[in-house]
Amino acid sequence: MTKNVPAPAPRPLRAALVALGGSLAIAACGGGGNDGPVFPIIPPAPAPAPAPQPSPLGTLDGSAPLVIGHRGLPGLFPEETQKAYEAAADAGADSLETDLHLTKDCVLVARHNPWLSDNTNVFEVAKTNATVAARKRTVPGVLVDVKYPAIPENGPAQYLSDLTDPNDPKSVLKSLVVDGEPHFGPDKTGDWSITDFTMAELKQWLGGTTYDAADQRPTELNGKLPILSFQEVIDIAKAKSKSTGRTLTVYPETKNPIWNNAQAIANGCGVAGSHPLEDALLKIMNANDLNRKDAPIFVQSFEPESLKYLRSAGLKARAVQLVDGNDIDLKTGAMIYVTKDVYTFVDGRPYSWTLAGNPKWFGEMLTPAGLAEIKTYADGVGPWKPQVMAHTIVPYKDKGTLADVNTIKPTALIADAHKAGLFVHSYTFRNEAKYLAGIYKGDPVAEYLAYFRAGIDGVFSDFANTAFAARQTYLKETGR
């Protein structure tokens, strides 16, 4: 048998084969005969190495944490005004947060506090407007005994009420006592209630101002931007969603609902025992196609009874149980709820618990059992920042302050809430140094990154621009 010897390869190809180390296979070409030249078959180039996969995010649904424009962008503009909300949307906020009260004519209005000297120019307006001046509330509240055991561990034995005449439900329109706390303007003689003005009057006479860190934030627009109705906030979100191509949510809070409902009933917005505040919210949600599970809205409240009523009355959208506290034990990182003053009733426990004689604290909501209860009527929980991240001074020094905090560590809250199927949106992130723990060295981005890395689902921020930039940094470090 004659051996078939392949013809020598041309010199350039032979050189290439040598250079490749003889790794190419030699095979016959043609119709199956053994005579004729053979040519190398070059295999396909190896597939490129797969790109590194982004590391998973710690949020409940694995998506990027939300930037919630807390009252718009109040770090730069008067809070809860059109300018503040539009600026928040332009800065990258996913949601526009607002507080809701009912006006004298039963309209939902976007204002943080119902006492007006804090976040409007009412005190200055009253100097030249006799009608406004005459509406200041100056009648003192009355003390009422608590129904639970009056022991120091439960806080003060009495709280203030605006029901100065138990036989007259309309007497609540005379004092300005909100959830056990009396309010006085700069002259300490009383204050103005938002429920004493119609929506038109609020727009005609008053303008919004800065509130938190008012001595450090821009003030040139104070009093020059009108107060908004909730419908106007919804309209801003819709317009910005259209112009930016992003779906912005609104994030309304039923603020001081027990007080608001008593005021509204006295103003003729509902009958005794009704819930005018929540009913007005449901009505406007239905009118704007916002009452569905996937609607661009989150409904929040510190008052569990408000959210439970909303569910019973037909709320289908996402709801968030807010959770408060009074202070931090900087030695242990534990929350402090009880105080010796009115803040026990304001921030220590839901006001409905005080009225019902329930001495438990907000912290009860953050236990696994409390979170399971929240899951029966809400989709998420909104805790104060130190309830999410324990703040401590190590080694501890007596009379230390937030500026001395040098250790932070996630509590069990995010993990426990996620296990219960609840997302976690924490409040309130601000840029000013006085609001930052010492460990962050005055850098607000460092604070955001700590919470993002811990798996927070969303942050309420007074500076949506800073929150957005911090989130971009976080997403980049996770490979996105």
Image (tube, rainbow, N blue to C red):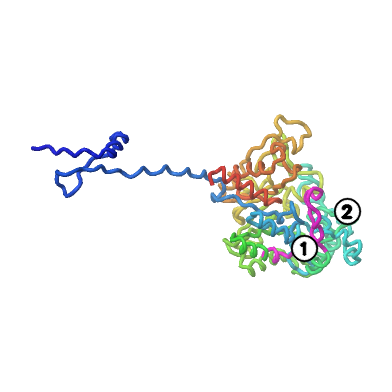
- Image quadrant in which the N terminus is located: top left
Neighbour tally class for label 1: few under 14, some 14-19, many 20 plus, Cα within 10 Å: many
Q: Is residue 401 left or right of residue 381?
A: right
Q: Residue lying furthest left in this view?
A: 1
- Residue 231 among those drawn in magenta: yes
Q: Residue lying furthest top in this view?
A: 395
Q: Amino acid at mark 2?
A: Pro
Looking at the rendered structure, the secondary structure element under dot 2 is loop
Can I make out residue 333 in this image?
no
Q: Is residue 379 left or right of residue 347?
A: left
Q: Main secondary structure of the magenta part?
A: loop
Q: Residue lying furthest front in this view?
A: 11
Looking at the rendered structure, the secondary structure element under dot 1 is loop
Residues at marks 2 and 1, CA–CA distance in whole angstroms: 21 Å
Q: Position of residue 231 (x, y in %)?
A: 69, 66
Q: Amino acid at mark 1?
A: Ile
Q: Which residue is mark 1?
A: 227
The answer to which image quadrant residue 302 occupies is bottom right
Q: Is residue 300 left or right of residue 245?
A: right
Which of the numbered marks, if any, corresponds to residue 186?
Answer: 2
Q: Position of residue 157 (x, y in %)?
A: 81, 47
Work out whether residue 445 or residue 32 is closer to the camera in this orientation and state it. Answer: 32
Q: Position of residue 197 (x, y in %)?
A: 82, 66
Residue displayed at 68% across by 63% down: 236
Residue displayed at 38% across by 44% down: 47
- Residue 450 among those drawn in magenta: no
Residue displayed at 64% across by 37% down: 409
The answer to which image quadrant residue 191 occupies is bottom right
Q: Position of residue 228 (x, y in %)?
A: 74, 64
Magenta-highlighted residues: 206-234
Closer to us: mark 2 or mark 1? Answer: 1
Residue displayed at 84% across by 57% down: 117
